[in-house]
Image (tube, helix red, strand yellow):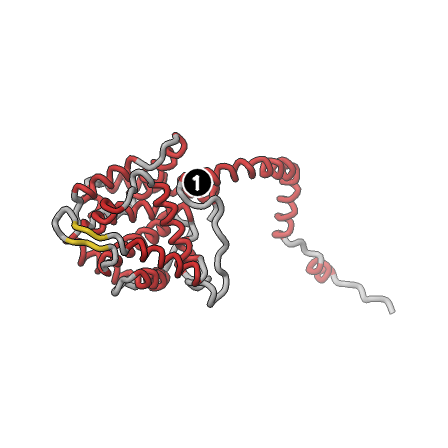
Amino acid sequence: MHEPLRTPERCDSETAIDPAEVAVRAAQVFTAPLRVPLAAGARVIAPVRADIRRGIRRSLGVPAEPPPRAAHVGEAFLPPGCVARRVHGDLASMVVGGLAALLLQTLHPLAMAGVADHSNYQEDAIGRLRRTANFVGATTFGTVEQATRAIEDVREVHRHVHGRAPDGRRYSANDPELLTWVHVAEMSSFLAAAERYGPQRFSTDEKDRYFQETAVVARSLGARWVPETVGEVEAYFKRVKPDLYAGPQAIEARDFLLRGVARKPNDRALYVGIVAAALAIVPRWARTELGIPTPPLVEDVMIVPLARAFCGALRWIVRP
């Protein structure tokens, strides 16, 4: 038997053209002439981008290429899917947050005395950056063994860091209160930079988890109490603020950090962008104490948009 004739309506419904498919095919037709030159351009740019990437990572004191991450639960020091890895995985915002943390940390007179008396940060700034980057990398992306080794190395250094601050008080790098201060100043700055300049946004719950996840590092170094929520971090800053001030050692460190650790013209240009971005996330009360206040209008209209563009360009070159 012959197949029955289809009605016109049925024919129309079965042979209807999908508008989305038409749009895709049209785009393919119109962009076809560009595919070869674009692919060739990408091949030309790739090695140049790689050279720039290596130069930037070298100027920032981090390895030419990041080491492999511990990818399995039980092997990794921090869980592979944790918030801390998302925050610390963006090099652009981490560099900005790291500089902001250094500026903030100078305001604690005992912590600043330990740095001034027992480090050569002005002569070996890149080396100090590299050691800090390696520590954060090991305790965020490394195995339990790698993180434990990095923590023990820091604890060994801390055993020799003690003395008397300019105000007469004794200090020790193993002081649990100082360990908490350094940790909170650093983690809060990393998170602030990631929020303002990074490619992701974090909910309040995720921010709380970030402080909970990273608290294990501070406790492993010897801190007794570490804030584990956004609210606890804010309360902590309110509690310690009366004890913070910019003494002579802090001012010297401030001037050095603002002046820059770079020597080559290209590195200095890179550093200027990092400084501008970092200052915008240092708490206003801390900037005022350091003598570097920024008018809100200038910050919102000029500094932050330019810093976001700068971090985006750095992210494209270096890759997370």
Lateral position of residue 231 relative to residue 200, left or right: left
Lateral position of residue 243 relative to residue 65, left or right: left
**Secondary structure beneath disc 1?**
helix
Instruction: State the residue at coordinates (50%, 54%).
Output: 68
Front in this rendered view, residue 128 or 136? 128
Could you tell me residue 30's position as x and y percent? 64, 40
Tell which residue pokes out farthest to the front in this image: 160
Q: Residues within 10 Å of mark 1 (few under 14, many from 20)?
A: some
Residue 67 shows in this picture: yes
Lateral position of residue 126 relative to residue 238, left or right: right
Front in this rendered view, residue 35 or 283? 283
Instruction: State the residue at coordinates (39%, 46%).
Output: 130
Front in this rendered view, residue 251 or 96? 251
Could you tell me residue 259's position as x and y percent? 29, 35
Residue 204 shows in this picture: no
Tell which residue pokes out farthest to the bottom in this image: 1
Could you tell me residue 218's position as x and y percent? 31, 60
Asked which quadrant contains residue 42, the reply is: top right
Tell which residue pokes out farthest to the right in this image: 1
Q: Name the residue under label 1.
A: 58
Quarter occupied by the N terminus: bottom right
Could you tell me residue 291's position as x and y percent? 19, 40
Tell which residue pokes out farthest to the left in this image: 168
Above or below: residue 19 compared with residue 291:
below
Q: Label 1 is placed on what type of residue?
A: Arg
Instruction: State the residue at coordinates (61%, 52%).
Output: 20
